[in-house]
Image: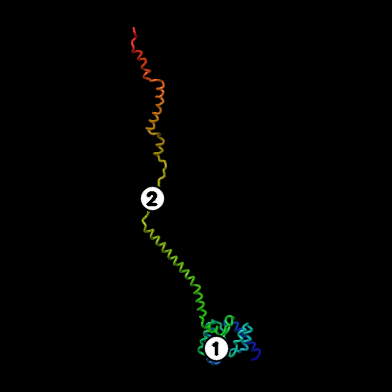
Amino acid sequence: MARAEKVQAVQEIAERFKGSSAALLTEYRGLSVTEIAELRTALRDTQADYKVLKNTLARIAAKEVGLDELAGMLEGPTAVAFVHGDAVEAARALDDAAKKFPVLVIKGGVLDGKIVNAEQAQQLAKLEPREVQLASIVMMINTPLQQTANVFSALLRDLGSMLAQVVAQKESEPPAPETTPTAETTPTAETIESSEVGPAPEAQASEAASETEPDRAEVTDGGDPSEAESDPGDDQSEPAEK
C-alpha cells in the first residue's frame, strides 16, 4: 500500500472511531467468507458496520483520536464493529454470532469514549436495549408522580363523599321552628295618654286630705268653735235678777 493510501486509510479509521457511539473489536480467525457476510448482515440491522482492519493502521488511528489503550487489543486478525445505533443491540448481535461461531472472539472496545475490556463488552450484550432502559427510567420517574396523583384523587373522592353525606343529613333533618323576634319596649299611645292625664283618683284624694290638715290645725290653735258660739247663748239663758 502506498504511503498516500495508508494516510487516507488512517484518516478513515480515525473518522470511524470519532463518529461511532461504540467500537467493538473482534478476532475473526477461522471464520469463512460466508460466515463473515452473515455477521455483517446481523450487525447492519443494528446500525453497525463490520470492517476488517490492519492492526498497524488501526493503532495509528486510535492514537490520533486519543484511544492509545486500544493498541493492546489490536493483535491478530482484527475486525471492528463501528456502532452508530444502540451499542447493546450490536453487542448482543456479536454475542449471538460468537455462540453460533465459537471461533469468533470479542476482545473489547470503546463505549462512549471509554475503553472496555472483553468481559465488559460481553456484559454489555446482557443489558436491556436502550429503548427498554429508557422506558424503565421513565417508569421509575413517573411512579412516584402517579402515586402522588392517586393519593390526591383518593382525597378528593373522600371529600366529595363527606360533602354528599352532610348535604343528605341536612336535607333529612326537620325544619327548625320559626322564632318571633322579641318586641322592643317602645312607648305606646296608651302609655303616653296615661302619663298626660295625671295621677289616679286615689292620689288626688290623698293630696286633698293632706291639704285639709293645715286648716284643722288652725282651728285647733284658735280654740273650739263650738265653745266660742255657745258663750252668747249662755249669757241669754240666764234670767236677770229683779
Q: Residue furthest right?
A: 3
Residue under numbered circle 1:
105
Cα separation, mark 2 vs mark 1, equals: 100 Å
Q: Nearer the viewer, residue 3 or 130?
A: 130
| Label whose residue precedes the other's in the sequence (2 or 1) | 1
Looking at the image, residue 9 sits to the left or right of residue 43; the answer is right
Q: How far across and down, in percent of the image, does residue 33 sit?
A: 54, 92
Q: Secondary structure at mark 1?
A: strand
* Residue count near mark 1 (Cα–Cα under 10 Å), binned few <14, some 14–19, many ≥20: some
Q: How far across and down, in percent of the image, does residue 102 sit?
A: 52, 90
Name the residue located 37 percent from the left edge and 32 percent from the top edge: 202
Q: Secondary structure at mark 2?
A: loop
Q: Is residue 34 above or below residue 183?
A: below
Q: Nearer the viewer, residue 165 or 108?
A: 108
* Residue count near mark 2 (Cα–Cα under 10 Å), binned few <14, some 14–19, many ≥20: few
Q: How far across and down, in percent of the image, does residue 171 sit?
A: 38, 58
Name the residue located 37 percent from the left edge and 57 percent from the top edge: 173
**Colour scheme shown:** rainbow
Residue 179's label in the rendered image is 2
Mark nearest the camera among 2 and 1 is 1
Which amino acid is tagged 2? Thr
- For the N terminus, the image quarter is bottom right
